[in-house]
Every structure is written in structure tokens, then in C-alpha cells.
Image (tube, grey):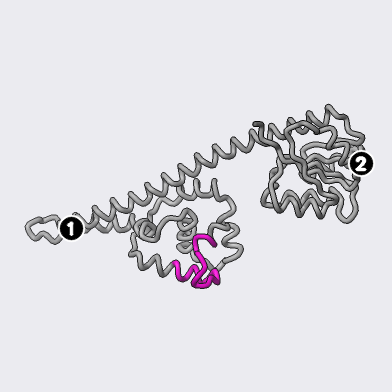
Amino acid sequence: MVSQSQILVVDDDSRNLQVIGSILKNLPYKLYIARNGKDAVQKANEMEFDVILLDIQMPEMNGFEACPLIKKSEFNAYTPIIFLSVLSEVDDILMGFKLGAVDYLTKPFNHAELRARLSTHIRLRKAEAERTLLKTDKLKRKLISESIMLNEKQELLNTVQNQLLSLLKDENLNLGKDITRSIKRIGSNIRYKHDWNEFDKWFTEIHSNFYPLLLNDFPQLSQKEIKVCALLRLNIQSKDIATIFNVQPTTIEVYRYRIRKKFGLNIEDNLHRFISTY
């Protein structure tokens, strides 16, 4: 069974809606109707569409006014919008493209042209969605790999440091100065030389708006708290975050408490769920 593409048709003229319905009859499309720009924006904020056919001349809110609001919606920021209008002036067409439309059709509709334009943009939309999904999956795997490597690196450094400390306590070995120097170098590496550049690179690829949005809402967060938030965003447990930072788990709990306080969360609010909204 062929899956149906969801199309939002925005037009205040019942005759135009009937014409479009007749043209697209028996095709694998499910049509949703909006009678004006306000109704279209509301529907765009409720569900995702494969294509939006948007009339320009409508009461209350015209197509030019509705288009940028639709592009701001969570579900349809990248949904192709095709303007429909009796207008055919160059300035009107350019205005439509400037506002984010991908195509422009004038009334009365050419049946074959409308079908072809819809088919093309739906195919392009699905192809882009597949590429984005593959890229996102690849980036997520890379980010998880970087997180694990960062964690394992700190565990290794901790183990070596503890072994050197044990050797230093052995009075039969005359390696005190060399071991002490090595311990200091390892400790310095653990505390101050975390390889966050590579981690941040992959994290930002997936969550590009995370840092800007978080800092915009909570500028009082410290750099360490921001890093803790990034790891919590990945649902990494406190004990693993403690290993990465080479601190006790209780220290991470203190960070979590401070972060929750700055966020203004109640005790019953889930910190990870809140951070995941960014």
C-alpha cells in the first residue's frame, strides 16, 4: 500500500478548493484544508505536512503574512510552500521566494502542472529527509563514540595515576622524583586538558542551537555547568560524568543541584527532560 503524502491547502475560496480536490483525486495525497492564514499557521503548529499550497489573497491573514509564521513552526520549518494566486507580477513572485516559498503557481490551475510540481517537491522533500536522517544517525554514533572515548581516557589516566601513587609509597624503589613528576603531569592532563574540541564539534553538529539557546535563557551558567548540561543532554549518568571530569560523583550532584536551582526547577521536575527541550 502506497503511503499518502499530507498536503495542506490554504484558500478561502470553496471553488478553488473543489478544483484542487478534483485535480488531485485518486492520487496518494491526503488533503487538509485551511480557510485563511491564521488557520494555516495553527494547523502548521499541530502537525507536519509534505507540501503546503498557500493562497496569497485571503482575509484576516494573507499568504505573505502566514508564510514566515509557518516557517517558524516546529513541524514545518523545512516543508516546501507553493504559493497559489491570480497574481503574476514579478515583484509578487520574488516576494514569495524571499519569504521562503519554493514555487509559485497562478490561477486558473493547469492540471498537469499542479500534479507535476507537487510530485517533484514531495520527492525532493522525502529525499532530503532521508539524507538528513542518515547524517543525523552517523553524527549520533560519532558523538556517542567520542563520549565513550573521553570517558575511557579518563579512566585510564586515573588507573595509571593510582598505580604510580602505589609505586611511590614503595620504599624499596628509588623512583620518587620521576614518579612524582609523572603524577603531576597526568594530574594536569586530567584536570585541564580534556579534549573537548572534538566532542563539541560533533555535539554541535547534532544540537546546533543547544549552547546559544541555553545561554540566552540562563546566562548565569558557568562553563563547567554548561559542559555538564551537554553531557546530561546525552543522558550520560552522573558517575560517568564524574569520571570524565575526574571528580567524585558527589561533586556532580552538587553541579546538578546548582543547575536545577538556576533553571528554577522543582524537586519533582526531571532535569534531563528539561535540558532535552533545548
Left/right of residue 110 with respect to residue 220 in the rendered view: right
Mark 2 crowdedness (10 Å alpha carbons): few <14, some 14-19, many ≥20:
few
Estimate the x, y position of residue 116 in percent, counting from the top left.
78, 28
Quarter of the image where the N terminus is located: top right
What residue sits right under mark 1 in the picture? 177
Task: Please name the residue shown 88% across and 56% down the image.
Answer: 60
In this picture, which residue range is highlighted in magenta? 256-274
In three-dimensional space, the C-alpha distance between marks 1 and 2, rounded to whole angstroms, equals 91 Å
Q: Position of residue 246 (x, y in %)?
A: 34, 59
Q: Secondary structure at mark 1?
A: helix
Q: Amino acid at mark 1?
A: Lys
Identify the image quadrant of residue 7: top right
Nearest to the eye among marks 1 and 2: give it. Answer: 2
Q: Nearer the viewer, residue 77 or 111?
A: 111
The picture quadrant where one finds residue 80 is: top right
Measuring from the top left, give residue 105's x and y in whole percent. Answer: 85, 35
Q: Which residue is mark 2?
A: 15
Is residue 262 magenta-colored?
yes
Whether residue 94 is in magenta: the answer is no
Q: Is residue 136 visible?
A: yes
